[in-house]
């Protein structure tokens, strides 16, 4: 379990993202999209992310669209904010994506959530 004391500040999130080029910060989470060579490779990536999730006991929001896998890590038990667990899980997911020759397309991640009517989704 995590609590609010484990939440990373925005400068800490930005510093972590410097080492996570596949990821972006959006509305309290780390998000990305991985494009795989085939649908089968996307399923391999999903299985690998699932294995990481079980090992770390930290599960992402995940969506599959043919050869694209949309992933969002946030710590629901810390008020839907980013914690070090999210950073570690994102790094592991990026390694899994590289193993199936996936290409990161974090700019393709879109959220149905709104940021209080602001123009900036961050």
Image (cartoon, helix red, strand yellow):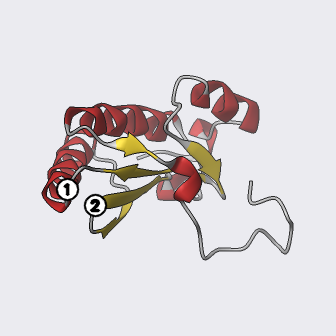
Q: Is residue 114 left or right of residue 59?
A: right
Residue placed most toward the observer, 8 or 43: 43
Residue 44 percent across, percent down from the top left: 14, 50
* Residue farthest along the right direction in this orientation: 118
Residue pointed to by mark 2: 67
Mark 1 Cα-neighbour bin, 10 Å: few <14, some 14–19, many ≥20: some
The numbered dot on residue 38 is 1
Whole-percent x, y for residue 46 in the image: 22, 54
Residue at horizontal 13 percent and vertical 58 percent from the top: 40
Quarter of image, res 69? bottom left
Q: Which residue is at the front of the view, 88 or 108?
A: 108
Measured from the top left, where is residue 53 in percent x and y? 26, 47
Residue 75 higher or lower than 63, as above or below: above
Would residue 107 appear left or right of 57 to someone viewing this image? Answer: right
Q: Residue 118: percent from the left, percent from the top? A: 86, 67
Q: Residue at x 25, y 47 (%)?
A: 49
> Residue at the spot x=59%, y=44% of the render?
24
Give the secondary structure at mark 1: loop
Figure check: 12 above or below 71: above
User: Could you tell whether 122 is left or right of 117 in the image?
Assistant: left
Label 2 crowding class (10 Å Cα cut-off): few <14, some 14-19, many 20+? some
Q: Would you say the residues marked 2 and 1 are in contact, meaning their CB atoms lie under 8 Å apart?
A: yes
- Residue 30 shows in the view: no
């Amino acid at each position: 379990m995590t609590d609010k004391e484990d939440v990373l500040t925005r400068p800490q999130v930005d510093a972590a993202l410097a080492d996570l080029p596949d990821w972006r910060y959006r509305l309290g989470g780390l998000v990305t999209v991985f494009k795989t060579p085939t649908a089968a490779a996307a399923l391999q990536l999903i299985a690998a992310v699932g294995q990481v999730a079980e090992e770390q006991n930290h599960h992402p929001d995940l969506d599959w669209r043919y050869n694209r896998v949309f992933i969002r890590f946030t710590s629901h038990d810390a008020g839907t904010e980013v914690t070090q667990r999210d950073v570690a899980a994102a790094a592991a997911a990026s390694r899994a994506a590289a193993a199936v020759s996936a290409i990161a397309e974090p700019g393709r991640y879109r959220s149905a959530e709104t940021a209080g009517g602001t123009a900036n989704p961050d």
